[in-house]
Image: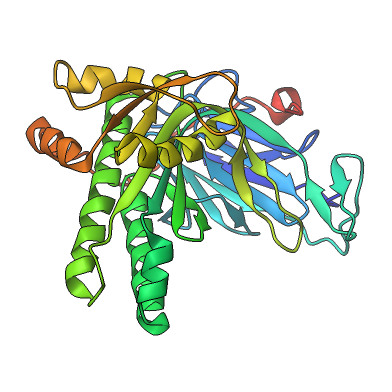
Amino acid sequence: MNQGPSAYLVLQADSGTRRFALVEGKCWTVGRGEESNIVIKDRCISRNHAMLQSTESGYYLIDMGSSNGTFVNGRRVSVPLIIHDGDTVTFGQTELKFFRPQIEEAAVNSGDEMTLDGTVTSILHVRKLMSVMVVDMRNYTVLARQTDENLLSEVMTTWFRNAGHIIRRYGSWVDKYIGDAVMALWFHNSETVTKQEMMGILHALNDIDRMTKALSKRYPLPFELRVGAGINTGYGMVGNAGSSSQPDYTALGDTVNSAFRLESITKEIGAEIAIGSETYQYVLPLIGENRVFKQCSVQLKGYEQPAITYATKFSALNTFLSLAGDKPQPKIKKTAPVTAQMKSMDHGVRDI
């Protein structure tokens, strides 16, 4: 895709103004680590902090699970979003200005894929360590048959909205609303998952369960609302899987697929929550000797070999979290900028 004149970032530093053109590729990483395309020497910036991606829809800014956040015009980036000419982008405590010269027309090249209906789909993806959480409303078919349509619409709209608020509170976003389920992603900014991140995921899930039960008391429903959940951790590909008219920034791969299968298997094993083996390795240091999760050998749909999962119920998870101490606190932006040093984009840009 030819985006016309290059977009660029401007940094106002003590040493003067520096301009960094987004050229020679379609994806640029930002972080404290030397492997990043844009290296910012700011102690408040993660080694792999954020990513800029050029698509036919514009320039996406994606926070990659940074510790201190990415901000656009003072608002934290919780979902991938398109940035516009003149926006102020803040990584950690370092502010830059984004500029995109006006172009008349965007053309297509070999970096994109033409679909049968004539639209263009960006095929660029980046491999990332992530945790995927799928939460599904139990007995929804029965609920839909026994509930007035207007009431059902109000209940589900409220449930989706509240679930989204809870998930954002713990540093993620709802990547998908699928019928009677939600899928959330947590990107991890290194080769591991921190205890705070994993505790945040567990608290988010527990809060969704409590919110769901509270809805049952608020509305005249035929039975108490319940949810089931699957959590899986591993590597997946993240990128724009949509077209220019309907961009869809999402994650793909076995890690995502397994999270859905884990949620489904809970109904067969008499559990409410099932987590994958790798997720359990990060949960284990948190629970210690507590028998919160029970190991099970299960046959996931579409998989030839049995898989090991760890299952529990919300009552056990709630008891553990109540005894574990305070919830993770939301990260608060610090607005005072600091001096940053960046390596030249002429040497640092690469096509990922």
- Residue at the image position 14 percent from the left and 21 percent from the top: 290
- Is residue 330 visible in the rendered structure shown here? no
Q: In which quarter of the image is the C terminus?
A: top right
Nearer to us in this view, 154 or 350: 154
- Residue at the image position 65 percent from the left and 41 percent from the top: 239
Q: Is residue 165 above or below residue 42?
A: below
Q: How many labels does the image show?
A: 0
Residue 50 is situated, as x and y percent measured from the top left of the image, at 53, 37
Q: Is residue 185 above or below residue 312?
A: below
- Is residue 5 visible in the rendered structure shown here? yes
Residue 23 is situated, as x and y percent measured from the top left of the image, at 78, 37
Residue 298 is situated, as x and y percent measured from the top left of the image, at 43, 25
Residue 186 is situated, as x and y percent measured from the top left of the image, at 44, 38
Nearer to us in this view, 338 or 241: 241
Locate residue 111 relative to residue 183 in the image: left or right.
right
- Residue at the image position 62 percent from the left and 56 percent from the top: 82
Q: Which residue lies furthest to the left in this view?
A: 323
Q: Which colour scheme is used?
A: rainbow
- Residue at the image position 36 percent from the left and 55 percent from the top: 138
Locate residue 19 relative to residue 157 in the image: left or right.
right
Nearer to us in this view, 230 or 241: 230
